[in-house]
Image (spheres, rainbow, N blue to C red):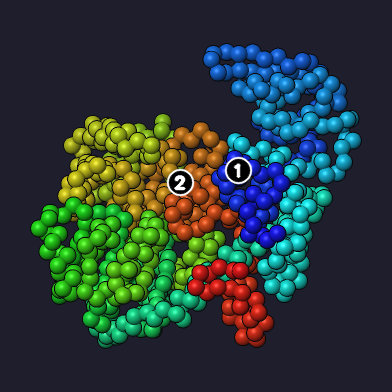
């Protein structure tokens, strides 16, 4: 037998079940061995008397009344019986699982998994895990700890377990090679691979299982980091980057002409970028900085440097509003250059002209939305590609843009503070520059959380502030599922506020379904101070810069994620004046209340992002699915952060090691595919 053999050769797998196993991702013997349980059921169970209201747990109890099955409606049913644990008798009910009736017999011990209803002294059953033989407590140590696998129709838990056992009996386990260097096994006291895999499926006890899990998680995260490091080294050594010989003096002169001095963090980031550009290696850099930290100007100067080297640069942004804003900035800053704006709303003739200018090299810099990566967009000599708010773009989109030049240098900017955990995971193959200070003279934004009942008071205050020339954003509630409702909300809010303020404030409305020039016009009116208050959906979420705006009001703030709220809040506090962010929300859930409080308490985007991650899980955050972060089978980015960091350190050191201690190990690593074999 080989690990790569199909499981069809194992006893008990027919053509039909083979198809089912394949759907689970199990085709080979190796797949089978590494298909780990996603949790373990402590079948010994808990004492019902100790359960809290609403708690989910496994309870072992004896059935004391026959099961009664009642139907209501066509498909809905309820199965009820009474069970006894020690002296305590409690009710059990299962909804819509009529077939369980056969499993319930008076006198039998069952391991029931469900949710405890304290008031009714009743277990709302979700699953019957097993029937427990004999008296309570008599089952052996192994039986207390059952692995639970993800299965599907056509593959039963028991058949899967049996199949794994068969593979073990046939000697499959002994074929699994150790894939961690011995130095690490020793250093971190990790279980050998074969032993760990065995213990993942059939742990002797919780202690052994814990050790196995630690080893398996380490392996998963370490392999991932090794791949990232390999990619990074491969990019650096293999592919030649562009050598961008920029004109130092011209760049310095431009910088001196800015209306402000760069902060030292900005200066440092700029130097890192310029150094990358002049090196023959390929730049692949992430520029991170909290909202308002001034990433744009760093990007602009990098683009200018590229121009002085005789090359074109492109800046890709996620929204039209942002594209126009950047375009306006660039033309103002570099009146002597040819800057183009490429968006999807262009007339055919305009578009044709812009494309031909790009191709001929007439254009020095271009700003655009997704329109930049469409077919037919060709450059003369693209030297630098920048993406702003990069988390909004998938890996593929960035790649397409990059392939439009001959391996141009790449800079990605993000204001959404990617939690460190994720940054080193997803972007471990990139270099990172961080702008960790705000420009001088900024006043901290005061954040308040108010209930809807207090909204009137807020409006009175806003009225006063507007008389004193304040400019205000009001964000309408987010309805993610429905654009129509989203719009309706914004319009209703606009009308309500127009009614309230009458002649006291000039109010505008901005939403995603408006035409581009309409959006642009509203934005300009607001920027010019012709509007006092702008009601908007989240279209203004990222990047928009109106330094004079000082009040941000967010309706139903609890519907937004923390990172998004922080982004919205970042629209104010951009000038010298004192700014405020008002969260209007009556959250029902505890976590909703917590989130509002965290927003009030912290201005630190990185901390907020970490909290967001904890509360929502990594998959939820700003479309991480497309960001290139894999989903791990056993490891979890939030809880296994420590292991991740250690794994990364070790991977970095292995590649940097000068003493040849890992040569043998790395020889097995394929640098082309970044696969380990
Ligand atoms: P972000 O990092 O969120 O993209 P921006 O680049 O939009 O931030 O900058 C926010 C505001 O701060 C802009 O109005 C910009 O002109 C201003 N700004 C940037 N750098 C400085 C600086 N060094 N001193 C003062 N103001 C600055
Ligand atoms: Mg920005």
Where is mark 1, residue-wise? 15
Classify the position of the N terminus by image quarter.
bottom right
Q: Residue at x 35, y 66 (%)?
A: 295
User: Circles 1 and 2: CB distance less than 8 Å?
Assistant: no
Report x, y in % for residue 467. Answer: 24, 45
Secondary element at tag 2 = loop
Does residue 558 appear to the left or right of 85 in the view shown? left
Classify the position of the C terminus by image quarter.
bottom right
Q: Residue at x 24, y 42 (%)?
A: 513
Report x, y in % for residue 150. Answer: 63, 43
Q: Residue furthest left?
A: 349
Secondary element at tag 1 = helix
Cα separation between marks 1 and 2: 47 Å
Q: Earlier in the sequence, mark 1 or mark 2?
A: 1
Nearest to the observer: residue 203 or residue 302: 203
Nearest to the observer: residue 182 or residue 438: 182
Does residue 66 appear to the left or right of 221 in the view shown? right
Note whether residue 120 is visible: no
Q: Which mark is residue 561?
A: 2
In the image, residue 211 sits, relative to residue 245, either above or below, namely above
In the image, residue 616 sits, relative to residue 409, either above or below, namely above
Quarter of the rendering containing residue 54: top right
Nearest to the observer: residue 222 or residue 148: 148
Report x, y in % for residue 190. Answer: 74, 65
């Amino acid at each position: 037998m080989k690990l790569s053999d199909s499981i069809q050769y194992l006893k008990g797998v027919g053509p039909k079940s083979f198809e089912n196993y394949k759907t689970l991702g199990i085709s080979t013997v190796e797949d089978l061995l590494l298909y780990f349980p996603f949790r373990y059921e402590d079948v010994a169970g808990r004492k019902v008397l100790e359960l809290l209201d609403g708690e989910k747990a496994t309870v072992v109890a004896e059935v004391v009344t026959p099961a009664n099955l009642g139907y209501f409606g066509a498909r809905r049913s309820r199965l009820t019986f009474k069970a006894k644990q020690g002296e305590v008798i409690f009710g059990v009910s299962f909804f819509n699982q009529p077939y369980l009736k056969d499993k319930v017999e008076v006198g039998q011990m069952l391991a029931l998994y469900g949710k405890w209803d304290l008031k009714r002294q009743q277990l709302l059953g979700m699953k019957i895990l097993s029937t427990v033989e004999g008296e309570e407590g008599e089952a052996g140590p192994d039986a207390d700890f059952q692995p639970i696998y993800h299965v599907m129709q056509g593959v039963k838990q028991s058949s899967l377990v049996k199949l794994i056992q068969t593979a073990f009996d046939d000697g499959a386990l002994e074929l699994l090679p150790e894939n961690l260097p011995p130095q690490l096994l020793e250093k971190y006291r990790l279980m050998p691979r074969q032993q760990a895999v065995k213990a993942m499926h059939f742990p002797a006890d919780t202690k052994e299982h814990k050790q196995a899990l630690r080893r398996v998680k380490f392996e998963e995260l370490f392999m991932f980091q090794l791949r990232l490091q390999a990619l990074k080294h491969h990019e650096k050594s293999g592919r030649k980057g562009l050598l961008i010989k920029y004109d130092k003096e011209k760049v310095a002169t431009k910088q001196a002409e800015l209306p402000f001095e760069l902060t030292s963090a900005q200066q440092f980031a700029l130097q890192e970028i310029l150094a990358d550009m002049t090196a023959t290696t390929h730049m692949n850099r992430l520029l991170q900085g909290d909202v308002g930290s001034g990433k744009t100007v760093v990007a602009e100067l990098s683009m200018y440097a590229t121009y002085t080297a005789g090359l074109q640069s492109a800046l890709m942004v996620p929204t039209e509003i942002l594209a126009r804003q950047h375009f306006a900035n660039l033309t103002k800053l570099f009146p002597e250059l040819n800057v183009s704006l490429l968006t999807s709303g262009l007339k055919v003739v305009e578009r044709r002209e812009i494309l031909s200018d790009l191709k001929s090299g007439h254009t020095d810099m271009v700003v655009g939305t997704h329109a930049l990566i469409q077919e037919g967009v060709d450059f003369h000599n693209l030297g630098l590609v920048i993406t702003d708010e990069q988390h909004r773009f998938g890996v593929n989109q960035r790649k397409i843009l990059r392939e439009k030049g001959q391996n141009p240098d790449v800079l990605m900017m993000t204001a959404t503070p990617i939690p460190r955990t994720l940054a080193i995971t997803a972007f471990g193959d990139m270099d990172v520059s961080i702008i960790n200070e705000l420009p001088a003279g900024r006043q901290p934004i005061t954040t308040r959380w108010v209930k809807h009942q207090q909204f009137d008071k807020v409006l009175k205050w806003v009225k006063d502030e507007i008389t004193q020339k304040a400019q205000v954003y009001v964000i309408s509630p987010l309805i993610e599922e429905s654009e129509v409702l989203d719009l309706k909300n914004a319009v209703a809010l606009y009308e309500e506020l127009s009614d309230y303020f009458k002649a006291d404030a000039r109010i505008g409305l901005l939403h995603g379904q408006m035409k581009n020039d309409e959006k642009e016009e509203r934005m300009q009116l607001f920027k010019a101070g012709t509007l006092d208050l702008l009601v908007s959906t989240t279209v203004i979420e990222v990047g928009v810069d109106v330094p004079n705006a000082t009040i941000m009001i967010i309706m139903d703030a609890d519907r937004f994620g923390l990172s998004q709220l922080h982004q919205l809040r970042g629209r104010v506090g951009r000038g010298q004046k004192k700014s405020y962010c008002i969260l209007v929300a009556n959250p029902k859930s505890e976590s909703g209340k917590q989130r509002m409080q965290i927003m009030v308490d912290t201005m630190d985007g990185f901390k907020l992002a970490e909290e967001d991650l904890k509360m929502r899980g990594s998959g939820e955050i700003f479309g991480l699915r497309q960001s290139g972060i894999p989903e791990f089978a056993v490891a979890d980015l939030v809880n296994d952060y420590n292991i991740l960091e250690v794994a990364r350190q070790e991977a970095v050191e292995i590649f940097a090691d000068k003493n040849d201690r890992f040569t043998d190990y790395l020889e097995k690593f394929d640098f082309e595919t970044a696969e380990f074999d």
